[in-house]
Image: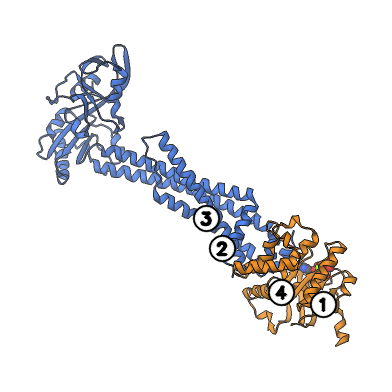
Chain colours: A orange, B blue
Amino acid sequence: MIKLENIHRNFQVGDQTVHALDDINLDIQDGEYLSVMGPSGSGKSTLLNLLGLLDPPSSGQYFLNNTNITDLDENQLAKTRNQNIGFVFQTFHLIPRLTAAENIELPLVLAGIEEKIRKERVYDALSSMKLLDRAPHKPEQLSGGQRQRVAIARATITEPTILLADEPTGNLDQKSGLNVIETLEQLNRRGITLIVVTHDAALGSRSTRSIRMLDGRIESDDAQGKS
Amino acid sequence: MLLLRDAIHFSWSALTANFTRTFLMLLAMSIGVGSVIILTALGEGARNYVTAEFSSLGTNLIIVIPGRSETSGGAPATMMGVTERDLTLDDAIALTRHPKVSRIAPFNIGAAEISWQGRKRETTIQGSTHELLMLRKWKMAQGQFLPEADISRANSVCVIGKNIRNEIFGAHAALGQWVRIGDRRYRIIGILGSEGQSMGFDVKDAVIIPVASAQSLFNVPSLFRIFIEVKTREALPKVMTFIKDTIRERHQGVEDVTVITQDAVLKTFDRILSALTYTVGGIAAISLVVAGILIMNVMLVSVSQRTSEIGLLKSLGASARAILNLILIEAVLLSSLGALTGLIIGHIGSWVIRYAFPVLPAYPPAWATLASIFVALITGILFSLLPAKKAAQLDPVVALASH
Ligand SMILES: Nc1ncnc2c1ncn2[C@@H]1O[C@H](COP(=O)(O)OP(=O)(O)OP(=O)(O)O)[C@@H](O)[C@H]1O
Ligand SMILES: [Mg+2]
């Protein structure tokens, strides 16, 4: 469960302050499927990074599963990212020298999990992503859609509760884009909280809840009307 | 927490992915370690060579050198001490009077040509007495050494080393032949069987004539050295005082000789050459620091090239500490591999030196091997701290955005 209270995120650029997030209040329940839309520079990525504990708020409170994350130190934040949060990026961010399987394995390696258990879980992830035959391939030998599925497998290998995707289809053609979205939605149906930033209205309309951002504020949230 | 084995595996993959970078750093490191080992091996070799040289003179040995050295303690400057008054054969004879003196060998040297039936060779001629044989612990191959005669008698006999024998006489019998040395003729009465070095001369190249003969051949009344062997070690100080007193008495109250024991000479050389070894080792160690700086630069470049990778690792749950460790493990892998390669280079290099100069026992000292590995590891780690810190402190959002 996510709860943001009066979140601000300011960037100092020269002597100018950019209000990337301007008094954000947001509640997200476990298992929700949320899309974040809005024009370029409206603060979507900043919000996602903040939710993913990559970026601290300038002010305000962020409760993740009832823990105030401002109370956590760097080590605990890293651990929470590893256990509870998965990221999917527009540019995939696979490590080129590692194979598909090794890329997927990485969060488990960082968590210090034993090799035997890691291999089993990577195998399961590969097979559920239909990537088994691609396991020993380097990212450059994979198609865009396959790369993003490797990235999704990596993001979910530690079985996090939240999956954050920043324009996950931005670098893909329509067909593989749809395939990736369907993969993410399938994960959501199995219970993961899915938050997708997208420019694509068609993709945005697939979510159960959609928020629209403008100038660092939440301009509209269709959950507001429902609740 | 990241398991060590996995961390090493990951860092290793980063190293092998960029072969040129890794190769360059390995090269720098291994040249550093290799040169420390080779240079110290050279220094050690020189030290052992000189030490062995002087030990071959025998034990309980006192060396009397004409001229007073300014500093006490018998530094090598003593060896070149300016002659103030001649050290004569009579001085040497006077020194035999002490009951604790077992052997005494006045010694003279000069360069001259030795020839026989048109074959000739320029060589160093040593003038001494019967006692020199025992004093230097030489062995005869054929014939006898200089006769046990009155020191001041200039007999026309000589003893030669193996090389001289072979070069001048070849297949002919040398014993009993008359050779020309300078403008005089001498009969060969013995051939030395010993080999090796002594006081900078190759025993195989030795030509030895009676000291009085050498004095007249080179027309110098003074002696170059007097070697005195003392019966017991305990008697050394007493005999030294006796020598100084006797010479002062004979030289109108001036103590114008330097009296040193072989021990003192050995210790001095040992000190000087050890210092030399440490110095060259230290200079070579500077190359390790240079290697360290190279490692730092290359690591900094590598960290900035891998910024987005580091951002990704952070997003996947790597703590700052884990990133720091990963980069440091890279440094440790690099420097230990570099040190190992350097070790091999150093030992092969020392072997080549020993092969090329067999007289020089150029074995790298253990401390140099250990110290260079230690310094390599330490510099590798120290100089990687900055790049590692930089990587650890990267803002993940900014790092992920970089390309
Ligand atoms: N590190 C930073 N330093 C300064 N300004 C920043 C930084 N990160 C974001 N901003 C600013 O904050 C605002 C929000 O940026 P953000 O990346 O969240 O926008 P976005 O909605 O994701 O845009 P896009 O759709 O183009 O990805 C922008 O004005 C941006 O310039
Ligand atoms: Mg964005």
Choose mark 3 or mark 1, whichever is in front. Answer: 1
Q: The disc labelled 2 sits on which kind of residue? A: Arg
Q: Are marks 1 and 4 on the same chain?
A: yes
Query: Within the displayed image, which quadrant is ligand 1 positioned in?
Result: bottom right
Q: Are marks 3 and 1 on the same chain?
A: no
Q: Dot 1: within a 10 Å radius of its alpha carbon, few (fewer than 14), some, or many (20 or more) residues? A: many
Residue to which mark 2 is pinned = B5
Chain of the residue under label 2:
B
Residue A93: where, in percent of width, then height?
74, 62
Query: Along the polypeptide, which appears first: circle 1 or circle 4?
Result: 1
Chain of the residue under label 3:
B
**Can residue B31 be seen in the rendering of this structure?**
yes
Residue to which mark 3 is pinned = B379
Residue to which mark 1 is pinned = A34
Along the line of sight, the residue nearer the viewer: B59 or B142: B142
Q: The disc labelled 3 sits on which kind of residue? A: Thr
Residue to which mark 4 is pinned = A85
* Gap between marks 2 and 4 measured at Cα: 25 Å
Choose mark 3 or mark 2, whichever is in front. Answer: 2
Give the answer, above or below, for where B47 lies relative to A160: above
Residue at the image point whose x is 87% and y is 82% from the top: A222
Is the residue under label 4 in contact with that under label 1 (CB below 8 Å)?
no
Lateral position of residue A124 relative to residue A209, left or right:
left
Choose mark 3 or mark 4, whichever is in front. Answer: 4
Q: The disc labelled 4 sits on which kind of residue? A: Ile
Examine the image and state in which quarter residue B50 appears: top left
Q: Secondary structure at mark 1?
A: strand
* Gap between marks 1 and 4 measured at Cα: 15 Å
Q: Secondary structure at mark 3?
A: helix
